[in-house]
Image: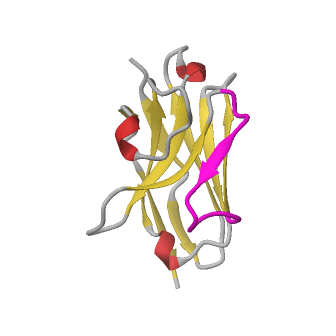
Amino acid sequence: QVQLVESGGGLVQAGGSLRLSCVASGRTFRNYHAGWFRQAPGKEREFVAAISWSGDSADYADSVKGRFTISRDNAKNTVHLQMHNLEPEDTAVYYCALDTKSYYVEYQLKHYDVWGQGTQVTVSS
């Protein structure tokens, strides 16, 4: 069973940048699409970005397009989320996840069946 560990969260001022990382255990990581989701206090968990198993295609939520970039390094079993021009509305716990079953890259939470523990991102105004 693949396990995920996120890191890189923290406190940053509006307009700043952070880079989140997610390290996976297990050699099957490279076979799966990966995604980042976030959950703000009192809100449902929402899609942020997803990347295909090969890294050739990616998808983003409208709210982060042009500011966030998802990438992966299958040789290092890692997926990253580079975040620029952060806004207070980006404050949330960010989760890395894998979709071990789908053929296409999905954005709906229900398709992702392996989750990390989350990392807190706080953006101050």
In the image, residue 10 sits, relative to residue 86, either above or below, namely: above
Question: How many numbered marks, from 0 up?
Answer: 0
Helix, strand or loop: magenta stretch: loop
Judged from this view, the residue extending furthest toward the left is: 42
Q: Is residue 38 magenta?
A: no
In the image, residue 61 sits, relative to residue 97, either above or below, namely: below
Q: Is residue 58 magenta?
A: yes
Judged from this view, the residue extending furthest toward the top is: 27
Query: x and y percent of residue 66 in the render?
Result: 71, 65
Query: x and y percent of residue 97 in the render?
Result: 45, 38
The residue sitting at 58% across, 77% down in the picture is: 13
Judged from this view, the residue extending furthest toward the front is: 104
Q: Which residues are magenta?
A: 54-67
The residue sitting at 66% across, 26% down in the picture is: 76
Query: x and y percent of residue 59 in the render?
Result: 62, 49
In the image, residue 19 sits, relative to residue 102, either above or below, namely: below
Q: Image check: 71 left or right of 98?
A: right
